[in-house]
Amino acid sequence: MTRTIDYGNLMHSAMRGLIKTVLQDVSDNGLPGNHHFFITFQTGHPDVSMAEWLIERYPGEMTVVMQHWYDNLDVTDDGFAVTLNFGDAPESLYIPYDAIKTFVDPSVEFGLRFESADQDEDEDELDLDDMEIEVEEAPAPSHDAEVVSLDSFRK
């Protein structure tokens, strides 16, 4: 039997480690500047903990935003807990890193996406062997103006 290097799992581990490092920094120091996060996760993951009414409302996946108001951010080796505001009702969530589908910081146009090779499989079970990672980092927007002559549009 030939041993191989499992780059897919190694990349997943590294990217989830990046999320952990970022969240730990936010827990220790707060969100800097305009940074904020859109985090999409599988609500049916067995280790997700959240209010029953939220699970009923979002039975497959949910996107939360960490920006202006969040509290009790607690980062662990396996996931993070945070209290977020849902219509003036604070709710505590626990999200394991392996339940995360996307992690985006639009302020710097950075995003991570974890995709399953077979999206039709039971979403309650995550098989890292069948997952792919896409790292998206768009270039900074250009603020250069272009002058266009109206004569080019006249007949």
Image (cartoon, rainbow, N blue to C red):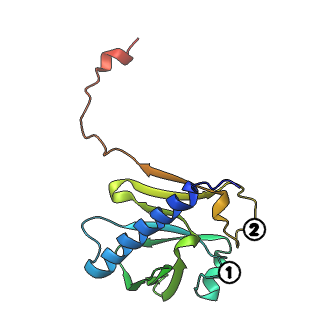
- Asked if residue 89 is positioned above or below residue 35 in the image, the reply reads below
Relative depth, front residue between 60 and 114 = 114
Q: Residue furthest front?
A: 1
| Res. 122 image quadrant | bottom right
Relative depth, front residue between 146 and 16 = 16
| Res. 155 image quadrant | top left
- Measuring from the top left, give residue 88's x and y in whole percent: 45, 86
Q: Residue furthest top?
A: 155
Q: Which badge, 1 or 2, comes first in the chain's sequence?
A: 1
- Measuring from the top left, give residue 5's x and y in whole percent: 57, 55
How many C-alpha atoms fall within 10 Å of the one at disc 2: few (<14), some, or many (≥20)?
few
Quadrant placement of the N terminus:
bottom right
* Helix, strand or loop under label 2: loop
Q: Could you tell me if the residues under marks 1 and 2 are in contact, i.e. CB atoms within 8 Å?
A: no
- Measuring from the top left, give residue 47's x and y in whole percent: 61, 82
Give the residue type at disc 2: Asp
Instruction: Say which of marks 1 and 2 sits in front.
Output: 2
- Asked if residue 17 is positioned above or below residue 7 in the image, the reply reads below
What residue is shown with label 2?
122
Give the residue type at disc 1: Glu
Relative depth, front residue between 18 and 70 = 18
Relative depth, front residue between 127 and 120 = 127
What is the tally of numbered marks visible in this picture? 2
What residue is shown with label 1?
56
What is the number of the mark on residue 1?
none
How far apart in space, not on screen, are marks 1 and 2 (Cα)? 17 Å
* Helix, strand or loop under label 1: helix
Relative side of 87 to 57, left or right:
left
